[in-house]
């Protein structure tokens, strides 16, 4: 190259220096782009991409995308996430495979409602109702209950003033429970649990309260029990696992033909088929005796429960003859007779001869006392001599009296049914110990309660015109009772008791 001349400039970069730098940049760019695509592929489920593609295709084709299902689940582990994503994208549910399946709007609506109604899905958005439970104590009034719940007396008056049905709350009893739902120091709902089967709710609706009564139906199971007497019916029943309600029912069923104070003999047997009541899988009590047999000194008596067209229930022999008297032989489950009917008895307190115009039944304090027959309460009060007492009129001819009670459970003019609890045994008034003094009057004249019943007519038997209906009703009970009795004999049990429980059939027949 000659001095003074300039070298010719090249339009290309030197391959030894610039080419390697350009190659590194290109590799970095391509590598970064590939990595981004890979990350995008891993993060975005193929279901969403395919769903969006199907959405676009449907829109171009003029098809409502909400009627198309993109079935794009690749494996079962992604099913739950895929379904929720598809719902969010306003597509239908996703199922296994990649073949689009058309569903009707009704099907899609049902699937959407199922998801929205899922308790787990709504739990996060719906605040759980909080209840404050207050138990009714002795002497509590409705205003006291409201104060216990953190409210004021004016809140109770507001409920009573804005809901006529709320006046029923004035009849709450100790042991009952009230549930309060309170928001911002204001009552929203009051729930009164009258029993395990019945409750009443009072819900605020703007400027008033709406009342609703909820009655639940228990499940019924039939139980069969057989036992033999060694001493008394009550003790035999207890040994067989029967509760007091069923034992008293059994005594009432055969009360018209058997005197359970004097007639029972050692070795007598009884078998009964009765109802056990269950709610939410737990036993809550017993129902009615459906069929029963009592063998007294070799004589067998069988009774079946029958309810006529008017809803009146009774117990009858297979020929339709009533097994019951119009009155109970004894209005309680007693241990012994402490004093008989005696016109010339020496009074234990006054030490003088005074007529004892009734029978004294010794029993523990608090033992339930039953109405001897259907009637109306004419007196319910207290006197110095009689203590707490109740008088019941059973029509124009018959009257029964119950003295020295601890508590009275009925008020004057109340209607009572035979066997209904009207009070409890006590020793109020002139009494040396807990007992029931029971009197029976016929046309105003005192009669011996133990002997007068034999002269009184039984309850009405089945009318001739109603016999076909009666026979049809008890047919299934006869078969079931016979089967269970045969099963007991085949088992040859010598324990003195045997029980069999099964779900109640639809054809219980009563």
Image (spheres, rainbow, N blue to C red):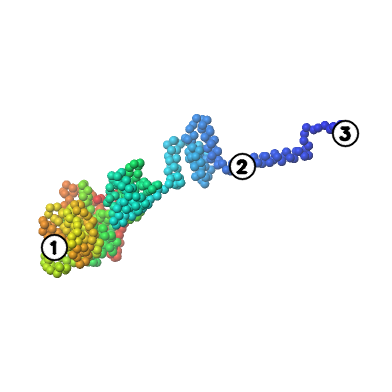
Whether residue 201 is visible here, answered yes or no, is no
Label 1 environment density (alpha carbons within 10 Å; few <14, some 14–19, many ≥20): many
Which residue is depicted at the point 52% across and 37% down?
A: 51
Name the residue that disc number 1 marks. Answer: 357
Which residue is depicted at the point 35% across and 42% down?
A: 205
Locate residue 294, reporting x and y percent.
22, 60
Which residue is depicted at the point 17% across and 55% down?
A: 379
| Element class at badge 1 | loop
* Cβ–Cβ under 8 Å for marks 1 and 2: no
The disc label shown at residue 78, or none: none
Whether residue 9 is visible here, answered yes or no, is yes
Q: Quadrant of residue 53?
A: top right
| Element class at badge 3 | loop
Name the residue that disc number 3 marks. Answer: 1
Locate residue 137, reporting x and y percent.
31, 56
Q: Camera-side residue: 408 or 483?
A: 408
């Amino acid at each position: 190259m000659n001095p003074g001349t300039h070298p010719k400039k090249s339009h290309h970069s030197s391959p030894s220096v610039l080419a390697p730098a350009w190659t590194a940049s290109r590799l970095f760019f391509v590598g970064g782009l590939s990595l981004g695509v890979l990350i995008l592929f891993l993060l975005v489920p193929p279901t969403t991409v395919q769903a969006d593609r199907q959405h676009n295709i449907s829109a171009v084709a003029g098809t409502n995308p909400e009627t198309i299902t993109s079935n794009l689940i690749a494996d079962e582990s992604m099913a739950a996430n895929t379904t929720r994503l598809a719902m969010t994208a306003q597509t239908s549910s996703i199922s296994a495979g990649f073949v689009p399946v058309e569903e009707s709007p009704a099907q899609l609506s049902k699937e959407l409602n199922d998801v929205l109604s899922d308790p787990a899905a709504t739990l996060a958005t719906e605040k759980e109702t909080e209840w404050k439970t207050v138990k009714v104590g002795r002497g509590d009034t409705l205003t006291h209950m409201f104060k216990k719940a953190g409210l004021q007396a004016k809140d109770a008056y507001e409920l009573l003033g804005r809901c006529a049905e709320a006046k029923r709350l004035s009849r709450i009893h100790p042991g009952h429970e009230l549930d309060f739902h309170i928001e911002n120091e204001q009552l929203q709902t009051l729930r009164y649990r009258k029993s395990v089967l019945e409750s009443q709710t009072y819900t605020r609706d703007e400027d008033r309260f709406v009342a609703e009564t909820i009655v639940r139906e228990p499940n019924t199971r039939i139980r069969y029990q057989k036992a033999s007497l060694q001493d008394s019916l009550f003790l035999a029943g207890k040994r067989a696992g029967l509760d007091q309600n069923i034992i008293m029912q059994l005594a009432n069923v055969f009360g018209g033909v058997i005197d359970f104070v004097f007639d029972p003999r050692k070795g007598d047997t009884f078998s009964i088929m009765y109802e056990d009541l269950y709610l939410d899988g737990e036993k809550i009590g017993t129902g009615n005796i459906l069929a029963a047999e009592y063998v007294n000194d070799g004589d067998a008596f069988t009774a079946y429960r029958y309810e006529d067209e008017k809803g009146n229930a009774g117990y009858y022999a297979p020929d339709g003859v009533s097994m019951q008297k119009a009155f109970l032989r004894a209005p309680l489950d007693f241990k012994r007779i402490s004093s008989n009917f005696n016109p010339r008895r020496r009074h234990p307190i006054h030490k003088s001869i005074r007529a004892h115009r009734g029978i004294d039944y010794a029993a523990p304090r608090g033992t339930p006392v039953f109405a001897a027959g259907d009637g109306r309460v004419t007196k319910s009060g207290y006197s110095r001599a009689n203590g707490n007492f109740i008088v019941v009129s059973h029509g124009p001819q018959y009257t029964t009296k119950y003295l020295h009670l601890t508590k009275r459970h009925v008020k004057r003019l109340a209607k009572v049914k035979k066997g209904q609890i009207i009070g409890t045994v006590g020793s109020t008034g002139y009494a040396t110990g807990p007992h029931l003094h029971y009197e029976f009057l016929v046309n105003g004249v005192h009669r011996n309660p133990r002997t007068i019943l034999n002269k009184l007519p039984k309850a009405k038997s089945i009318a001739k015109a109603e016999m076909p209906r009666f026979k049809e009703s008890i047919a299934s009970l006869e078969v079931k009772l016979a089967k269970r009795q045969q099963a007991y004999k085949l088992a040859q049990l010598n324990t003195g008791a045997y029980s069999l429980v099964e779900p109640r059939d639809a054809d219980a027949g009563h």
